[in-house]
Image (cartoon, helix red, strand yellow):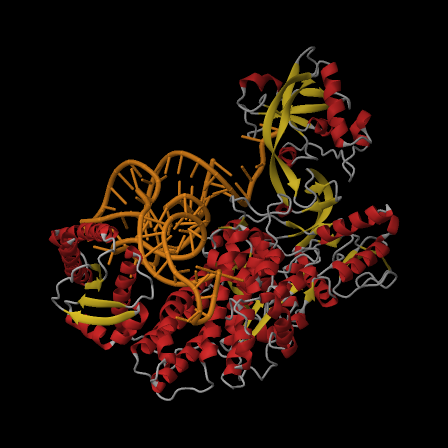
Amino acid sequence: MRATMELSTRYTPADIEKPLYEKWEASGCFQPPPPGEGRGKTFTVMIPPPNVTGVLHMGHALNGTIQDIVVRHRRKSGFDTLWVPGTDHAGIATQAVVEKKIYAEEKKTRDDLGRDEFLRRIWDWKEEHGNIILRQFRSLGCSCDWTRTKFTMDEDMSRAVRTAFVELWEKGLVYRGARLVNWDCVLQTAVSDDEIEYVQRKGKLWHLRYPVVGREDEFIEVATTRPETMLGDTGVAVHPDDERYRGLVGKTVRLPFVDREIPVVADDSVDPEYGSGAVKITPGHDPADYERGQRHELPIIDLLEKDGTLNANGGPFAGKSREVVRKELVAAMDEMGLLGAVDDIVHNVSTSDRSKSPIEPLVSEQWFVKMEPLAGPAIDALNKGYLKFRPERWGKVYLHWLENVQDWCISRQLWWGHRIPVWYDEDDVAVASADELEIGAPHPKTGKPIVRQDPDVLDTWASSWLFPLATLGWPDHDAPDLARFYPTQFLSTAQEIIYLWVARMVMAGYAFMPERDERDRNPFETCYIHATVLDGKGKRMSKSAGNGIDPLDMIEQYGADAVRFSLVLLTKEGQDVRLSPDRFEQGSRFCNKVWNAARFVMMNLAGERAQGDSDRFEDRWILSRLARTTREVSAALDEYRFNDAATTLYRFVWNDFCDWYVELSKHRLTGDDESSAQHARATLARVLGDTLGLLHPFTPYLTESLWEALHDTLGETPEAMCAIAPWPTTDGLDVDESAEGEMDAVQDLVGCVRRIRALTMVAERKPLRVIANVPKDHVRGVLERHAGAARSLAFLESLELATEAERPPSSAVAVAGGIETFVALGEDVDFAKLKDVLAGRAEKIAKALVGAEKKLENQGFLAKAGEDVVQAERERVVELRLEKELLERNVAGF
RNA sequence: GGGCCAAUAACUCAGUUGGUAGAGUGCCAUGUUCACAGCGUGGAAGUCGCUGGUUCGAGCCCAGCUUGGCCCACCA
């Protein structure tokens, strides 16, 4: 009882969360049992490592909740459960953050500091400010094994990255070459196709005239959105069938400013309808032109420095930025009479995901991974069913990308990241090595001294794609953890990284685990794509839009459990969710309801358990409901239907347990029948205990604290914390159809009385004398047996059951479930409302009856519908007829 | 241009193989010694986006359309 006294009438999450988390963590219960001590069945989840610079947003909170529900459920279900946490070094993002900070504080650039010093500063920053987000995952209650927290720049990860690179190199899947790449002029690095987005912007379409060589005063007009690139033009293309330009194909035109003669060529890719029908070709700075240039063997002219200013090829504009050149060049063309129309257009501008600056395509030396050979097995993994997406439709998205995959540009001109493990001797002979090679050491192939390492670093995803492998010990193929925990079972992540991360992890699994059979190379069985969190208006939540709801604010206000439960209750599998702060009320109220229900139970427990099974119908009923709930919640969690599980629990706790069972238990607990009271106490304790277990994955703090209090009240020492106590089973429970049917009858009768009270304004607890006509014998029998329950719930002075009793004078009536309930009231009661309600119901029932009768007259229905359906319809007609008869009789009676 | 998702009560959303349209919030009425006013009880509220089709029967299946959102591709 001591613990119970301490429970306040309100659930105050702030007081309990932190100490409980510390207790869990200290107990080691988030770690899987040591090898040999567990049950052997493992369940592994890899967290999608958030950026080390990140802070928790609502998407993280939802994803963290989902993963923790899965992990806690499996842990309680007896799996050796491992959830590996970690953060991603996020090359570009982190370097940009620290660069900015250093410049703001010291007015120094990374070049001022030098590579080694700059990297040291990033590590310092990471130690001090990084990993905030992992603490935030803790406050959400996430039960990761923090002893295994991994950072993608940790030494073992680095070794894995180098090893993977070397393996690909040896298979001939890595190559270096000059290609047109997406250049970010602000961050001054190449980025991959997957890191650019197309932003719709207003722009202009400039028409430029190039004089035709050898024909005075004749021009060919081209249209472009990027006039400054004309300095790099090496041709003009027109459609071969375009009459206007037929005579010009094969001629040359003279490019102003740089005075270059370039050919006019015919190319099918030109749309004669668009612009002027003639296209300038700039192979060095446009992907489509690059291809056109290749087809017509046109030279490539590189115009840009790495910062976006023009180089010497820019002629008079050399040294100026692309923006300035655009203005000046257009003005100069105009002056020369070479500027045609200038149209306003809206077009898509390719933009860097990271810096938000326009991408400048340019030709540069980069490292690439050949993707096609890697994609094949990843495609098979899905098609053969080793990998499943939830919702399934994302599988199509995954396949579409893999089937059209482009080679992956993996080099970045950054400092923060995994240095490309390639070294060169003085003749520039390259060698890739998983072990660090020292400058001056002999080159493994040529024996000459090594003079330098490749200066570039690898794309961040080149480490995260190894996360499931490297965190478990790869490249040591004999690592015990790899054997025990790989492949993993569940991955939950956001849709936008299906390409960037998910698909690549599958590729990595197949590429780097050759010793496993096909199924076990696949890194995770189920890839769950969670909902996108939108704001109240349906817009995507984002920092830049400023419409985000900070999950930490919500946790502070409502508690982690309320945030978790609300999110799950609102989020149907894979369906986007609109969120506003008040939506967290529902979870909060539910937690409070559970808290108070538990208080009630504990206030009435005396520390003993009842002997033998109860024959009370309400006990059998609630245990039957508990059995159904346990089954449904378990099945739903097995299948990752979180919303179904949460909804089932919500209804069971509130509508069955609190509204009916707890109310029914009150008169027993205070009555003189000690055996009945004991059974009530035992049932309350059983239901509460199991409910806490079922709820634990959703609301871990609440349930853990109540679990402790409940056992304390019972005078027991729990065999385990709720976090690891066995998942509730239906042992000793069964669905009891007859008890459920009996409860239906009681609820119908009680409902009738309550409706009468409400409509006639009779106080809820004023004792009433009730006569009920119950034509159905079995229902009357039920009510006879459970008159006590009905009387206590409906606050009746007396209950008389009959088959043909007349409505007493001045009495109100209500009808439900074939029960006609008369309540004797005084003369001064207003019956008008009651009559309206009766008439309304009668009308509704009559309508339903007509429909049902028509159905049964329909030969098609009788012939083609299933026999059980027809039978059910017949029974329904009987019910409706009775109900209608009772209702109409009473409407007429007023 | 290709693909995906959504449209159900005032709002946010459920609706499992086709067979009686539901929940939470809000609203109206009412009730606080007896777990919880963060609560109880009762009530009102829906042309299931539109048009066809399949079927004995469609919120659900099929076709087309409208509106909103997302992804891929990227015409200078």
Q: Nearer the viewer, residue A254 or A108?
A: A108
**Eyeballing the image, is A312 above or below A381?**
above
In screen coordinates, is A737 left or right of A470?
Answer: left
**Residue extending furthest toward the bottom:** A611
Q: Which residue shows up at 50% across the image and 52% down it? A: A399
| Residue A847: x %, y % from top left | 19, 49
**Eyeballing the image, is A385 above or below A675?**
above
**Eyeballing the image, is A724 above or below A566?**
below
Q: Which residue shows up at 76% across the image and 28% down it? A: A324
Q: Nearer the viewer, residue A243 or A777?
A: A777
| Residue A217: x %, y % from top left | 69, 10
Q: Which residue shows up at 63% across the image and 28% down it? A: A203
Q: Is residue A486 visible?
A: yes
Q: Nearer the viewer, residue A258 or B54?
A: B54
| Residue A241: x %, y % from top left | 53, 23
Q: Is residue A531 visible?
A: no
- Quarter of the image where one finds residue B39: bottom left
| Residue A877: x %, y % from top left | 16, 58
In screen coordinates, is A780 left or right of A364?
Answer: left
Number of labelled discs?
0
In screen coordinates, is A657 left or right of A367?
Answer: left
In screen coordinates, is A449 left or right of A737?
Answer: right
- Quarter of the image where one finds residue A336: top right
